[in-house]
Image (cartoon, grey):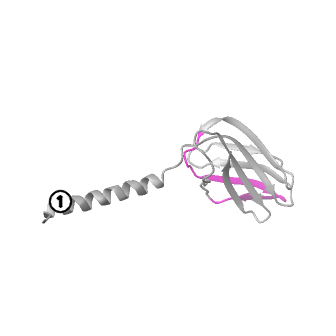
Amino acid sequence: MRLSFSRIALFIAMTVFFLMISCMASTKIKPITVDGLAFRNNSSNLIENALLVVVKTNRFISCGPILPDKECSTTFPQKKYRGNHIIVKWRQNGKSWSSKELKIQIPNNVLPGKSSKVIIIIDDQGYVQATFVQ
């Protein structure tokens, strides 16, 4: 049986299309909601004026002061997470610190349909981690 050139071309085009769709679906953000934030001080010094800024909207949440090995948390009305980049700013030992732009990674164990909390962890060297927990 001989396949025509147009059927082979159609088969190849459809295969490429479905591969592109599957790749796009895998990069899609999980539809999760957020209703809280905690800044965790994993350093040996007091943190003051901790601030999370959403880069795209310029909205922010602040908390502090935060004692060493403690956290400061707050809640807010439930929001959909849209994958926007954030910047974390704070003062420590009289010095102002700022993270680079971060995108919060969603762990596999965070399930859609259940509210999440953002955890920002700050250490002595100015290293910042951001994640979600439920």
Quarter holding residue 34: top right
Residue at the spot x=74%, y=56% of the render? 121
Q: From the image, which quarter does the C terminus lie in?
A: top right
**Is 49 placed above or below 99 here?**
above
Quarter holding residue 44: bottom right
Q: x%, y% of residue 33?
A: 60, 40
Q: Which residue is mark 1?
A: 7
**Does the segment drawn in magenta span residue 84?**
yes
Q: x%, y% of residue 40?
A: 78, 52
Quarter holding residue 124: bottom right
**Is 97 placed above or below 81 here?**
below
Could you say whether the residue bearing mark 1 is in a helix, strand or loop? helix
Q: x%, y% of residue 118?
A: 68, 47
**Does the segment drawn in magenta span residue 125?**
no
Magenta residues, start to end? 80-100
- Nearer to me, 16 or 95: 16
Structural crowding at the residue carrying mark 1, measured as other residues with C-alpha within 10 Å and reported as few (<14), some (14–19) or many (≥20): few
Q: x%, y% of residue 3?
A: 15, 64
